[in-house]
Amino acid sequence: MTGRSCLLIIFLLVLLLAAAGCATLSVGNVSYSTGNLSVTIAGSGTPVDTGVQVRVYELDEFGQHELLTTGITTTLAGTENTVEIPLHLDPGRYKIYVYLTTDGQREAAVIRDIAV
């Protein structure tokens, strides 16, 4: 293999990795305030319709109990998006499961602990 063909292969691999990184979504901070759960989502900057599903578990000394499941569909347009999901949480500790889907495919899933 010549030096030129090695450079071409490396260039194509870098291009492929860069393109793959642009297509993914990730969940950042999850917080609760005044009847809304705020979820920060990092996107590619290209508008994409995304489903945001949230499962909320209440935590106590003996474990966790599912409280509710809710979700919305939104269009993410920037590289950093904040999605507000209306729900009421009483004071306490919660485990929040966040799932992001695009075109029926799961893009990301995270678990966050919050206190209200």
Image (cartoon, grey):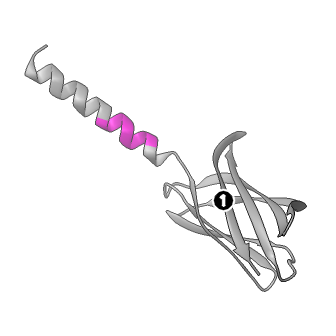
Side of 103 relative to 79 (left or right): right
Q: Residue at x 85, y 77 (%)?
A: 89
Q: Which stretch is magenta?
A: 14-20
Side of 16 relative to 35 (left or right): left
Give the overall secondary structure of the magenta segment.
helix
Q: Residue at x 67, y 52 (%)?
A: 49
Taking the view exactly as shown, the residue that stands out farthest to the top is 1
Taking the view exactly as shown, the residue that stands out farthest to the bottom is 34
Q: Residue at x 85, y 74 (%)?
A: 87
Does the magenta segment cover residue 16? yes
- Neighbour tally class for label 1: few under 14, some 14-19, many 20 plus, Cα within 10 Å: few
**Tag 1, which secondary structure?**
strand
The residue pinned by badge 1 equals 75
Q: Residue at x 49, y 62 (%)?
A: 79
Q: Quadrant of residue 26?
A: bottom right
x and y percentages locating residue 52 in the rendered image: 73, 57
Which quarter of the rendered picture does the C terminus lie within? Answer: bottom right
Q: Quadrant of residue 96?
A: bottom right
State whether residue 64 is above or below residue 36.
Answer: above
x and y percentages locating residue 32 in the rendered image: 73, 78
Taking the view exactly as shown, the residue that stands out farthest to the left is 3
Which quarter of the rendered picture does the N terminus lie within? Answer: top left
Side of 16 relative to 62 (left or right): left
Does the magenta segment cover residue 91? no
- Using the image as rendered, state which of residue 100 and residue 74 is in the foreground: 100
- Using the image as rendered, state which of residue 27 and residue 56 is in the foreground: 56
